[in-house]
Amino acid sequence: MKDCALAAYSWVCERTGLDQVWTALMERHIPEAKGWVGLLYTLGSATMMIFTVQAVTGFLLATNYVPSPDHAYDSVRYIDAAVLFGRVVRGLHHWGASFMVVFAVLHMLRVYFMGSYKYPREATWLAGVGLLLLVLGFSFTGYLLPWDQKAYWATVVGTTIAGQTPVVGAWIANILRGTDGMGAPTLSRFYALHVLALPALTAGLIGVHLFLVVWHGISEPPKRSPGKVP
Amino acid sequence: MNPWHEDYKRRYAQLKENGKSFFPHTVFKDVCVALLVLTVLFALAYYRPAELEPLADPTDTHYNPRPEWYFLFLFQALKFFPGNLEAVAAILLPGLGVLLLMGVPFLDRGPKRHPFDRPLWTGLGLAGIAGFAALTWAGVRSPLTNPTEEADPQVAAGRRLYDQMSCAYCHKIGGKGGAVGPALDKVAGDETEEWLTRHFKDPQSVTPGSAMPKMNLLDDEVKILVAYMKSMHAEEPFTKAAPKIFADNCAACHKLGKEGGEAGPDLSFIGTARDKAFIKKYVEDPSTSKPDSAMPAFKGQLTDVQIEDVARYLSSQGR
């Protein structure tokens, strides 16, 4: 029995390199960060965990949501009132959106104040800024989906502001809204962005971000430069 | 190649060598924090579920939209830019902000990493946080004028059916619609539910000679239309004393038509934006609706009957 399991394990390892991947990812060493400074280093993984919550609850919501002005509002009401745990799932997705912003920003502040973006981790920082922008993109496109008063009018304001960009403004507003004023094309575009384009881009960029973190190693907690301390 | 780069790499390799394995040490801390965050998230989702406002109404131009709280600082910052400048600022400020954020590792390139060794960048970061907090606080304090409670679903459904059946072709609500039938916001609220139900099933049965056609509505449809009609209250009449109360107490600061002062807002069209209940509450004590209002509270100055009267008077202005 034991031999059999061992044989299966070595079969898998030979074909996938699982053991080496495990060593490279899980047994890599991390510079020591003690006490509350060590806790600050968990903010990035917390952000990723919330992203997972958003992906799962987002999938569950999408199974009952209808992205059309005629049915969007009613389908959200239906989720709240009739779907098993629907209200909690929508609550999780709603609060998760705020949590994403909060934790992404806290993580960024940790990196900023510790100067962790310095050589050789400049590209990691750029990927992080890209991820923050994607989070804001999620929040902007997701806000419209319930098709209630707040959703509708906040998006009117948002797309109007985008339309005021010099030179390309009218073009951008047109692409976002898809029609004069706002209507069915706006809602389907925002929905497509929210559930297809943005998740794909985010997953890709998270991949880049994490690869760079592993490649360079996580930055060590900063020490005061020796000249200044008496 | 900067000379300190090689040096840093050598030092980092040493620190890494001396550090602990990612699994289980780091993973353990990450999982603990993740579980804590998840607990808070579940508690919020369970005890404070996401709100839903009434269905989007593209014709409701009085709606006062507010962004999600983390965009509130931007919303508030734009108030510093008048007129045409606001459009530029709305794009330029966030654009520059993002550019600066991306540029951070290319502007701050020395070997020093400790926040106390980089006073300029640490100060800039703290100033950014303080600015965000101050603007967000100012945004939160500025008055919220939209009701967050959900409208009765029956009423909302009735309103939609009213739109779908083009009832406004003959009837007015809020001054909009045709003049063939009566203005429903003036009369329908006074009728009993029983009367309205019979009316919707067969108009001639309660109003002989009515020009309204029989609609062959389903029972559910009749029910929601009745709910919608009952939600509208006939306008409450003000007394002859109301204009005088206004002239004696309010006109020093507020214009109504061509008469009145200019210290406060012109109230000529206030009835199109605010209902009686809001105005009454505002007159009693402005600070509950708008904390930085310069207007005095009139509760105690005027009797409750007088405030009710003047609120009815104002809510009819401009309608």
Image: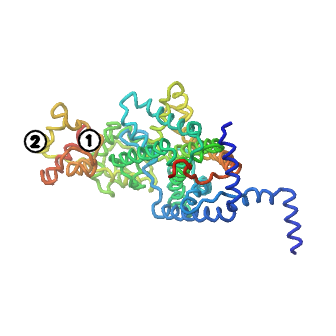
Q: Are marks 1 and 2 in contact (CB under 8 Å)?
A: no
Side (left or right) of B218 relative to B237: right
What chain letter is assigned to the residue under label 1?
B
- Pointer 1 local density, CA inside 10 Å: few below 14, some 14–19, many at least 20: some
Side (left or right) of A56 relative to A16: left
Mark 1 or mark 2: which is in front?
Answer: 2
Which quadrant holds the N terminus of chain B? top right
Which quadrant holds the C terminus of chain B? top left
Residue B137: image location, x then y, percent: 37, 48
Q: CA distance from mark 1 to mark 2?
A: 20 Å
Side (left or right) of B310 relative to B224: left
Amino acid identity at mark 2: Asp
Residue A102: image location, x then y, percent: 51, 52
* Residue on which disc 1 sits: B271
What chain letter is assigned to the residue under label 2?
B
Residue occupying image coordinates x 50% and y 50%: A73
- Pointer 2 local density, CA inside 10 Å: few below 14, some 14–19, many at least 20: few
Residue B36 picture quarter: bottom right
Position of residue B258 relative to residue A206, above or below, is above
Q: Nearer the viewer, residue B2 or A62?
A: B2
Q: Which mark is residue B303?
A: none
Q: Which mark is residue B248?
A: 2
Residue A155: image location, x then y, percent: 48, 40
